[in-house]
Image (cartoon, rainbow, N blue to C red):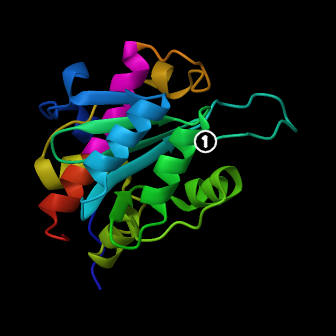
Amino acid sequence: MTHLPTPDKEQIALLDTFDRLGLHQIQVVSTPEQAAAALKALAAATALGFDTESKPTFAKNEASDGPHIVQLSTLDKAWIFQLTDAECRRAVGKLLESPAIIKAGFGLGDDRKRIIHKLGVDLQGVLDLNAVFREKGYRKDMGVRGAVAVVFNKRFIKSKKAATSNWANPKLTEAQIVYAANDAYAAMRVYAALGLG
């Protein structure tokens, strides 16, 4: 089997940028009312882009109590569930354990363990897109940046500052909201473009 090359940082840097979701296309879910509305909006989906974020740990033996947010996205809107509210946890748990909805994302092994621990639900219908690219002959884990470059010939912008920010904050910044939502959105776009749905 031939191994296809994964584009490197230098190659990706030359590409035009990938169109991301704007704030008006993102719903932060932090109250029981918002959780009920999000569950209603997403329950009929057959596939969603999926990711989580956890507050970073810096001390050597500090265990993460994440994830602190779960992101789910369709092809035109994303929802960010903050997991401090019990109804938000229940709503997102329902979506994550539904075998009828494919949850597509990148590098989800760690997310799976943390979600089982945090939400007490067993994830069903999860598709790690890295595995799909491996089947296509890419040797290295693709990740969202590499996948967007390969599938769309575009550069996916990720902010290091947002990535390592405090995801447990009750009020997320605009930069955090855009960063988190677009990780899930890009996964959904890649999933759809690969014709997996």
Which residue is at a point 24% across and 39% down the rendered structure image? Answer: 12
Which of 89/71 is in front? 89
Identity of the residue drawn at 29% across and 86% down: 1
**The magenta stretch spans which residues?**
174-185
Drawn side of residue 37 relative to residue 166, left or right: left
Which residue is located at x 56 percent, y 61 percent?
Answer: 109
Give yes or no for residue 173 being in the magenta stretch.
no
The residue shown at (17%, 47%) is 75
Q: Amino acid at mark 1?
A: Pro
Q: Note whether 124 is above or below 177 in the view shown.
A: below
Instruction: Out of 2 and 60, give the one closest to the viewer.
Output: 60
Residue 164 location (% of width, % of height): 56, 25
Q: In this rendering, would 187 be left or right of 24?
A: right
Q: For the residue carrying disc 1, how many other residues have a C-alpha within 10 Å: few (<14), some (14-19), or many (20+)? A: many
- Decide whether the magenta segment is chiefly helix, strand or loop: helix
Q: How many marks?
A: 1
7 with respect to 151 (left or right) = right
